[in-house]
Amino acid sequence: MKYIIVSTKTTSGTRLLPMEADVKEAFLRILKNRRENQNVSRWWMDIGGFLFLDKNGRPVVALH
């Protein structure tokens, strides 16, 4: 399996999604409590800052 991450074709394809303050707090808590694994490549953190990672520190995908 490989990850393919691309930008949107136009700027109108980029979306800003509003969220309530408690949702933001929950996401920040997830990031704060995440265990760091120094042995895993973090190229996806530079690209997208994925919120949920699997046990190997890779982004969770639909296959999971």
Image: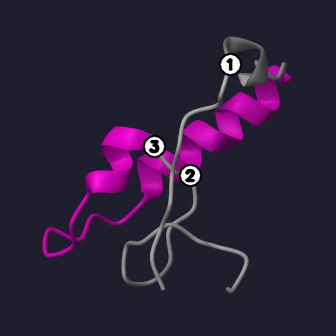
Residue 60 left/right relative to 1: right
**Picture disc at residue 10:** 1
Q: Residues within 10 Å of mark 2 (few under 14, many from 20)?
A: few
Q: Amino acid at mark 3?
A: Gly
Which SS class for mark 1? loop
Residue 55 left/right relative to 46: right
Answer above or below: position of 2 versus 59. Answer: below
Q: Confirm whether the magenta stretch covers residue 30.
A: yes
Q: Distance between the Cα atoms at labels 2 and 1?
A: 24 Å
Residue 55 appears at what percent x and percent y?
A: 44, 84
Q: Residue at x 64, y 73 (%)?
A: 61
Q: Earlier in the sequence, mark 3 or mark 1?
A: 1
**Picture disc at residue 49:** 3
Which SS class for mark 3? loop
Closest to the camera, between mark 3 and mark 1, is 1
Marks counted in the figure total 3
**Picture disc at residue 38:** none
Q: Residue at x 32, y 40 (%)?
A: 46
Asked whether disc 2 touches disc 3, contact meaning CB atoms under 8 Å apart, the reply is yes
**Picture disc at residue 51:** 2
Q: Distance between the Cα atoms at labels 3 and 1?
A: 21 Å
Relative depth, front residue between 24 and 54 = 54
Q: Residue at x 56, y 51 (%)?
A: 51
Give the main secondary structure, helix, strand or loop, of the magenta stretch.
Answer: helix
Q: Earlier in the sequence, mark 2 or mark 1?
A: 1
Q: Confirm whether the magenta stretch covers residue 1.
A: no
Q: Residue 19 occupies which quadrant of the picture?
A: top right
Residue 33 appears at what percent x and percent y?
A: 45, 56
Relative depth, front residue between 58 and 35 = 58
**Which span is picked out in magenta?**
19-47
Q: Residue 41 occupies which quadrant of the picture?
A: bottom left
